[in-house]
Image (cartoon, grey):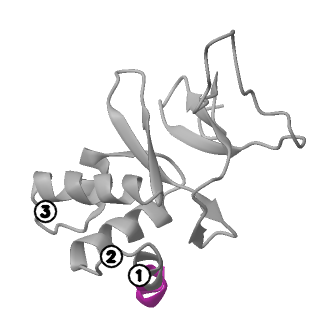
Amino acid sequence: MNTETIRNILRKHSLKVTPIRVQVLNVLLDSRVALSHADITERLDGEHVDKVTLYRTLNHFCEKNIIHKVANEERNWLYAIHIDDETHPEPDHAHAHFICDDCERIYCFPLTREAGSSVQTVKQGFLVTNQEIRLHGLCPSCQ
């Protein structure tokens, strides 16, 4: 992705533009699946990145709603970006997670809802603030 576009995304979210943030955001924008910390490190083209710096970068991106994290079947965090028109993060995008039972990749699937159809309460006294929908099956590569 264009470096200037990535810089604009960071600025839009009031984040300082640093080389590591640009590189990490580029990796996440280029991926169609959720990535682990190790996956991101591997994709940084041999750049030595301090583990703590990478975790802090990912946490800042989560706090700013540029990315979200999802736990895989082993309860490790994977990180993915919300995409709108293939180039820009969309922070409030409702989606489900598709987990391939063979390769274990996690894909974000958009959800469509009718107006007013989101769940507000489950049982009296409970308020839903976040929903997670997990779908299991085989991705196109594993079929």
Q: For the residue marked with disc 2, what is the amino acid? A: Val
Q: For the residue marked with disc 3, what is the amino acid? A: Val
Q: Position of residue 97 (x, y in %)?
A: 59, 35
Instruction: Name the residue that disc number 1 marks.
Output: 11
Residue at image location 47% in from the left, 61% down from the top: 66
Q: Nearer the viewer, residue 42 or 52?
A: 52
Position above or below: 21 against 128:
below
What is the C-alpha distance between the residues marked 3 and 2? 13 Å
The disc, 1 or 3, on the residue closer to the chain's N-terminal end is 1
What is the C-alpha distance between the residues marked 1 and 2? 11 Å
Instruction: Name the residue that disc number 2 marks.
Output: 22
Tell me whether circle 1 and circle 2 mark residues in contact (CB < 8 Å).
Answer: no
What is the C-alpha distance between the residues marked 1 and 3? 22 Å
Q: Give the residues drawn in magenta, as a range.
A: 1-7
Q: Position of residue 25 (x, y in %)?
A: 39, 67
Residue at image location 23% in from the left, 71% down from the top: 20
Instruction: Name the residue that disc number 3 marks.
Output: 49
